[in-house]
Image: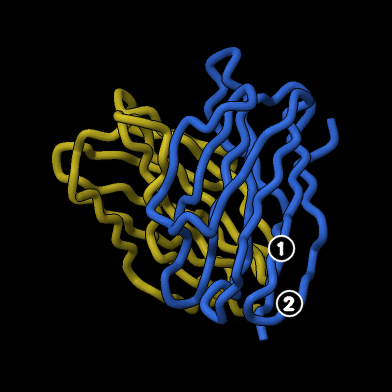
Amino acid sequence: KAGVTQTPRYLIKTRGQQVTLSCSPISGHRSVSWYQQTPGQGLQFLFEYFSETQRNKGNFPGRFSGRQFSNSRSEMNVSTLELGDSALYLCASRDMAGTEETQYFGPGTRLLVL
Amino acid sequence: KQEVTQIPAALSVPEGENLVLNCSFTDSAIYNLQWFRQDPGKGLTSLLLIQSSQREQTSGRLNASLDKSSGRSTLYIAASQPGDSATYLCAVTRYSNYQLIWGAGTKLIIKP
């Protein structure tokens, strides 16, 4: 099976712009989670989607939003970018149909906000 | 509030040594604990997952233990190799949802 893919891999934006990141989970996985990783804060949970519904949400401002499509692909949007949004954004998928609970991570999208 | 701490923050050892990485958490009400590996600029790779009812898991040269009562987990790496150089992160899963709470990681360097 192909792994989790994320596009784009690198992105440079300026303050005030908005950005959309994409994540394609492993085939058959219906849960997609998003994380932000920065040197200062480490890894932080953004949100999780399952069957097109947001199941859980971390402690991030409303500028961060996401959605999931019927094919389980997910997008994350950040509006009105701030310098502090520069980070590695990781998505992970997991199969919730059985007992497999391991999350499989994509390579991430590195966002730089200037 | 669940907090996860990893000690040490960095570790450098010669090739061939056995080593132990530590992870502690403040709330014992966890669903599971996972160890991940992250190579520079890359995503995360799951190494081991221990359910809250389990005491340990093994995969090849890796062995992870879990002591919920004391809020501790260790990752044991046997016969370390330069290819083991990476950052190792542990994460606990809350019972209330599937949110992972992460430690800051241990950066491991294995010297040839």
Residue that carries the numbered disc 2 in the rendered image: A13
Residue at 78% over, 25% down: A71
Quadrant, the C terminus of chain A: bottom right
**In percent of the image, x 50 and y 60: which residue is there?**
B88
Disc marking residue A19: 1
- Return the x and y of residue B104 as percentages of the image width and height: 40, 66
* Vertical side of B35 occupied by B13: above or below: below
Q: CA distance from mark 2 to mark 1?
A: 8 Å
Q: Nearer the viewer, residue A21 or B54?
A: A21
Dot label at residue B76: none
Q: Is residue A7 left or right of residue A63?
A: right
Position above or below: A12 against A37? below
Q: Alpha-carbon neighbours of circle 1 within 10 Å: few (<14), some, or many (≥20)?
A: some
Residue A87 in picture, x, y percent from top left: 59, 71
Can you give x and y, in whole percent of width and height, for residue A79 in the image? 61, 63
The residue drawn where x is 21% and y is 34% is: B29
The foreground one among B57 and A104 is A104
Q: Is residue B85 visible?
A: no
Q: Tell me the quadrant of the picture where the N terminus of chain A can be found.
A: top right
Outermost residue, top direction? A98
Side of A15 where A71 appears, left or right: right
Chain A takes which shade in the image?
Answer: blue
